[in-house]
Amino acid sequence: MLENVGLHVRGIDTSFVYLEDPSCILRGFENFLSYAWMVLGLFTGGLIIGWGISMIRGAKNDVKENFKTLILIFGILTAIWPILNVVYGGDLLGQGCKTMRVSVSGVNEILATKVKAQGTDSMLYEDIDIYDSGSGIRPVYEMPEPENFPDLSDLMYWEPDGGYVENNVGGHQGTGNTSGGVGVPPISFGGRTAVSAVNLAVGEITYTASDGSKYTHVGGSLTWRANNPGALRHSDFTRRMGAIGKTTNGFAIFPNPEVGRRANVALLKTEKYQNKTLAQAINTYAPSSDGNNPTSYAARLARAIGVTTDTYLRNMSDIQIERMVEGIRRIEGWRAGTVRNN
């Protein structure tokens, strides 16, 4: 499927698929050399046949000069690549083309979720947005939000206790039942708290509670399964913030959703993020290399919480940071699955 849309699969191992930018000019040059060798081979074959026929007919050919010319042509084609590599100082082809890696387990998770939701006959490739960066056509990210995009319109008045504050214009006041936005259920503050977790199967994370009982989060989004609303990567920081495990594709697993939410708030209050504007923070938090569009991501959050993308996080209030974290949860695709008692 990936190669059918013009991507070049450079390799695959047990963890990642390695893809290359299809617009890379060096790859085009390599293809040119390959075709040049083919054409030159055919040309050489024709020359040798012609020489042979002419010699049979008694014509005189300077065989040495002819072969010198062929050797010169072949030598130039052979030497081009090593010479370029010497000038470049390394493997020009291997390092000169932009390459990205896609998690195999992540792709399997997406496919497993789609199959579960739509059945094995669903057209899975229609749900994966792939475009050729060399075509000159780019996705338009500033289009009106699609119907299935998480609603952020209530973030201006949202509070972390699941309720709303009354605004100054319309007296908007909601209840905890709708604090997750349209189509995005709120985080449940009750339920179990785990002491350990393991991700052995795609689409499932099994937890062990303090009393020794086990339960499994099945289906839903990765953020829900891992109690990780902000999709934080497993790291020393998340371990300090209470993470009890990590998924097969490197995301932190927290003992309950509230611990995961607090870790996200704490991350945005670190010096690393406090000294960045909202736009810079999201560019770090959700980089384009991970398949995000940081510009659109930041713009949506800024509009929703009443700041500009140039606002420094250090100048945002605690409640604005809380609302930013709630917006991130929705954008990252929080979707509850089922809990199975083991």
Image (spheres, rainbow, N blue to C red):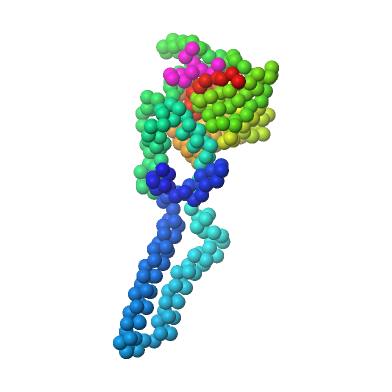
User: Chief secondary structure of the magenta span?
Assistant: loop
279 left or right, relative to 54: right
The residue lying toward the viewer, choosing from 287 and 45, is 45
Residue 140 image point, x, y percent = 37, 36
176 left or right, relative to 38: right
User: The magenta stretch spans which residues?
Assistant: 177-188
Any part of residue 283 in sight: no
Residue 61 image point, x, y percent = 36, 86
Tell me which residue sits at (46%, 34%) in the image: 111
| Figure quadrant of the C terminus | top right
The residue lying toward the viewer, choosing from 135 and 126, is 126
- Is 183 placed above or below 201 here? above
Tell me which residue sits at (50%, 38%) in the image: 290
Q: Is residue 183 magenta?
A: yes
Tell me which residue sits at (46%, 10%) in the image: 173
| Figure quadrant of the N terminus | top left
Dividing the picture into quadrants, the one containing residue 116 is: top left
Residue 213 image point, x, y percent = 65, 18
The residue lying toward the viewer, choosing from 271 and 114, is 114
Dividing the picture into quadrants, the one containing residue 114 is: top left
The residue lying toward the viewer, choosing from 336 and 294, is 336
Tell me which residue sits at (40%, 34%) in the image: 124
Residue 147 image point, x, y percent = 37, 24
